[in-house]
């Protein structure tokens, strides 16, 4: 694992992890310096009554402004709409309530609220890392899924008008506070539990195999994987299993804490695929489908690393790690092919080309070419 590029080790956000943690919302808003929050969430959270419950139990005053239009994959257009509401309501920070989409959208608004320029100029591939400053508006994150870990992550993935799905990346995007209350995930249906859980697992695996040398992040990633492999099947079978839900919330958080090591080819491929708005592809499901071919591609350079991964998932030394992960996801009910997800084979060359431009491409365990990416896509098809 040693000898790679050295990452800066910095875990500076504050996390409240416990059943019922949402009741401390008022206290955490004060600690984050937010007096007039805009809640960013989605229609499903509102319809399920989760927004009302969080506001009531957290002591939020009636009439708090809410942007409830977060799409399944956060868009540049939605960021503009939420920003307009943020400014008209004279807000000074945000509460992101929901899955990764709501949290990523809140981060995009936080950047726009404090900086001049189009949102795309802040994408990491456009040199945006250096443009995002400490002036970024504060965000308090309350996840209602256990997958992205965006509540402790320094990135946000946004779908732009031109069809590209790009990442914003900065330590200033890490939410000031995270409230991780596993009770808020109890109503998550089995399919979404499985897909978001596989997102967390892919984060842990990709971060652990990244060549960036960060032993702290590596240790966190392997712990997250060990927890998720045991807890995710339980959470899918019995959504009311609070202990399993708590373990998955920890695993999702740890997967994102490990982002300091960077991700890899799974995300380099899933990001451009997720940019096809008409296909409406779920990010976690894509990661589950793409993980086995990427694991096979990386195996020649990951001998010692894969030994530790096999140990973490309970696989014998020398066992087929890619095959194990494919069967694991299949047993959770995930359709394990891009074709089954409705991806047309004709777009695969375009996706392979786009993968080279994604910011996660640089930290894959093994250097990949456009032809390599195309081969992985065909294997997943």
Image (cartoon, helix red, strand yellow):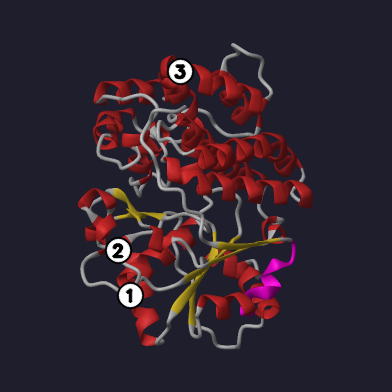
Q: Which residue is mark 2?
A: 132
Mark sitting on residue 31 = none
Question: Front-most of 373 and 209?
Answer: 209
Q: Which residue is mark 3?
A: 299
Q: Main secondary structure of the magenta part?
A: helix
Q: Residue 123: x, y in percent? A: 27, 54
Mark sitting on residue 113 = 1
Q: Which residues are magenta?
A: 19-26
Q: Residue 122: x, y in percent? A: 26, 59
Evaluate if marks 2 and 3 touch, with contact meaning CB atoms under 8 Å apart: no
* Res. 241 visible in picture: no
Q: Residue 143: x, y in percent? A: 58, 60
- For the residues marked 2 and 3, what is the alpha-carbon distance in whole angstroms? 36 Å
- Residue at (42, 14) in percent of width and height: 300
- Residue at (61, 22) in percent of width and height: 310
Evaluate if marks 2 and 1 touch, with contact meaning CB atoms under 8 Å apart: no
- Residue at (67, 74) in percent of width and height: 24
């Amino acid at each position: 694992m040693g000898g790679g590029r050295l990452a800066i080790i910095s875990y500076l956000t504050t996390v409240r992890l416990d059943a019922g943690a949402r009741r401390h919302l008022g206290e955490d808003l004060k600690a984050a310096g937010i007096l007039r929050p805009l809640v960013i969430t989605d229609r499903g959270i509102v319809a399920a009554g989760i927004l009302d419950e969080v506001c009531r139990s957290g002591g939020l005053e009636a009439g708090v402004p809410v942007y409830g239009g977060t799409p399944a994959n956060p868009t540049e257009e939605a960021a503009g709409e939420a920003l307009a509401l943020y400014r008209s309501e004279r807000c000074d920070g945000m509460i992101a309530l929901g899955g990764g989409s709501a949290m990523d959208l809140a981060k995009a608004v936080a950047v726009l609220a404090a900086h001049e320029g189009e949102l795309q100029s802040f994408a990491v591939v456009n040199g945006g890392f250096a443009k995002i400053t400490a002036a970024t508006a504060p965000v308090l994150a309350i996840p209602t899924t256990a997958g992205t870990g965006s509540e402790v992550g320094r990135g946000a993935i946004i779908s732009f008008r031109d069809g590209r799905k790009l990442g914003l990346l900065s330590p200033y995007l890490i939410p000031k506070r995270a409230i991780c209350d596993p009770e808020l995930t109890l109503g998550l249906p089995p399919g979404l539990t499985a897909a978001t859980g596989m997102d967390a697992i892919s984060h842990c695996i990709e971060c652990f195999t990244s060549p960036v040398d960060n032993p702290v992040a590596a240790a966190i990633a392997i712990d997250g994987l060990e927890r998720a492999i045991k807890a995710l099947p339980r959470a899918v079978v019995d959504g009311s299993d609070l202990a399993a839900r708590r373990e998955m919330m920890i695993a999702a958080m740890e997967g994102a804490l490990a982002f300091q090591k960077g991700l890899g080819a799974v995300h380099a491929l899933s990001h451009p695929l997720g940019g096809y708005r008409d296909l409406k592809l779920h990010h976690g499901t894509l990661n589950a489908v793409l993980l086995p071919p990427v694991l096979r591609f990386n195996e020649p350079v990951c001998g010692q690393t894969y030994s530790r991964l096999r140990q973490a998932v309970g696989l014998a030394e020398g066992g087929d790690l890619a095959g194990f992960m494919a069967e694991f996801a299949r047993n959770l009910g995930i359709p394990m092919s891009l074709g089954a997800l409705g991806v047309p084979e004709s777009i695969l060359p375009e996706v392979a080309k786009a993968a080279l431009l994604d910011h996660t491409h640089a930290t894959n365990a093994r250097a990949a070419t456009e032809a390599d990416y195309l081969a992985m896509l065909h294997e997943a098809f």
